[in-house]
Image: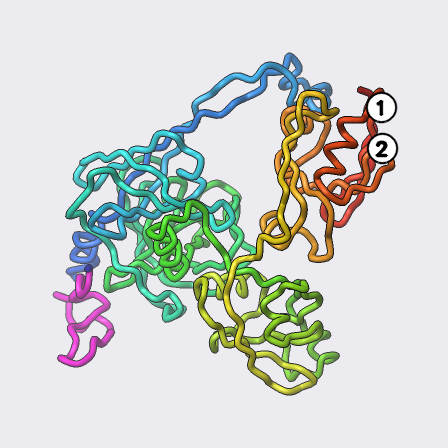
Amino acid sequence: MIRSALIACVLAVATPLMAETKIPQSQAEISLGFAPLVKEAAPAVVNIFAKQIVQVRQSPFTGDPFFDQFFRGFGNSQPRVENSLGSGVILSEDGIVVSNYHVVGMSTDIRVQLNDRTEYTAEVLLSDEESDLAILKLKDAEGLPFLTLRDSDNVDVGELVMAIGNPFGVGQTVTSGIVSGLARSGVATGNARGYFIQTDAAINPGNSGGALIDVNGDLIGINTSILTRSGGSNGIGFAIPARLVAQFVEQARSGFESFQRPWAGMFGQPVDADMAEGLGLRRAGGIVVSALHDASPFLAAGMEPGDVIVALDGLPVNTPAEMIFRMSVAGLGSDVNVEMVRDGEVQTRVVKMAVAPDTPARETVETGRRSAIPGMVMSNINPAVLGEFGLPLNLEGVVVETPGDVGARLGLGAGDVLREIDGTPIVTTKDAEKALRDARKRLTLEVQRGTQRVVMRFRL
C-alpha cells in the first residue's frame, strides 16, 4: 500500500520498468527528509493499552531478606491489575494488527488507539510467547490504513530504516537508522528466542510491537527488544523479520490460536572451526546432527546423525535458532530442500514441513482430591509433548503439564518428567495417578528436569 512514499532523500523515482535507489541529488531533495514517508506510514502504527488480571500471593514474609526465599508462594491469592503499554502495526484494512506477546499476549482488556485518536477494542487471535508475537483483530474495523509486508530475506545490511512506535508513552515517535546486522540469534531479551534483524534506529520501552520500515514504507520487522544497561537505547535494537510475521497472519486467519511450528525431531549444534576440520569441511558453518527421533521428518528423508545441514531452500543456516526460523517461514505442508554434507559430499534432501505427531495418545489426566498432589495435570510423552516442552528426544514416560497449587508449592513445574513415585517406575499417566492415590504418610518423587534427576521427599 505504501509504495513510493519517499520520492527523495534516499529513493529516486524509478524508470518505467524498475525502481532504482540512489543518494539525494540536490538540496531540494535533501530538505524533504523523511516527512513524506512518515505521513504515509505513521497512520498504520497504533498505540496499544492492555490490562491483565493476575493472582498474587501475599506472604507475611514478603520483602524479608532471609525468610522471603523460604516462604515465597505461600499466603492468600489476591487479584491485581497489571497494565502494559506498547505499539502495534495494522496489516489489513479490516483491522488485523501485529504486536509483541509481552505487550498483549495474556491480556483480557485491550484498547488500540490510531494515529488520529480513534479507538477500537481488540481481541487476540493468535499469540506465541517463544516468538514474542501476537496477532490482534480490531472489532468493527474497516477501511483502515495498513503497511505492506516485505520479504525480509531481501533486506541488506546498510539499508536505511525507520522505527515508529510509542516510547515511554509520550506519543507516536519516529527514529531513523540503518540495518546494522542480520541473522542475529540468541541476543534478544525477555521471552523472545529467535532470529532477528538488528538496527541502530533508537528503540525504547513502549516501542515494542512497533514498525521497522524501509524507504518504500514497507514493513521489514516488528521491533521487540534492545541490548542496554541503562534501560534506554544504546543503538542495538532487534526486530522480528516480516517473513515470520506473514506466517503468523496466515495461521491467525486460518483459525489457529497458537502458532504451529514445523517439527524437526532432531538435536544438533553449530559447527565451529575445530569441528569443521574433524568433519572434513572447508570452513566452519552449518549444524551437525547429533540425534534424530524415530518420527523425525528429517530421518524419513534419509538423514543420519553426523550429517551437516548447511542450507534450507538455498539460504544458509548456522544456528539452531536460524534453522527453526527457516522452517517456520517455509510454512506447514511445504517441501523444503535441505542441503547437507555427508563424508565431504554435498547432497540434497527434500523434507516435508509438518507439526510433531500427537501419537501415541497423551491420555492426559488431572489428579483428584484423594491424590497426594491434587489438581496436577499429567500427560504421556509423545513427539508433540517433546516439542511443546523442549524435552530430550529419548525421553519416555509422564510429563507434568500443570503442577497445580499443591504441586507448585512442593517445587514441581511444567515440563518435569516423573520417573518414579515411592520407588514405583512411572510409564503412563495411569501409573502416576495410582501411585499418587496410594501414597500415605510419606511421598518420594524421582523427577527429571532437563538433563538432571532430582529426588524429592515429602511428609503428607
Q: How is the image coloured?
A: rainbow
- Find out whether residue 3 is within the magenta segment: yes
Query: Which circle marks residue 442 in the picture?
Result: 1
Circle 1/circle 2 CB separation < 8 Å: yes
Taking depth in this image into account, of 275 and 362 the one nearest to the observer is 362
Residue at the right extreme, as displayed: 423
Q: Is residue 12 above or below residue 109?
A: below
Give the residue displayed 83% in from the left and 36% down from the top.
Answer: 455
Secondary structure beneath label 2: loop
Q: Is the residue marked by circle 1 packed among few (<14), some (14-19), or many (20+) residues within 10 Å?
A: few
Q: Is residue 196 above or below residue 373?
A: below
Residue labelled with disc 2: 422
Secondary structure beneath label 1: strand
Taking depth in this image into account, of 115 and 439 the one nearest to the observer is 439
Taking depth in this image into account, of 19 and 264 the one nearest to the observer is 264
Q: Which quarter of the rendering shows the N terminus?
A: bottom left
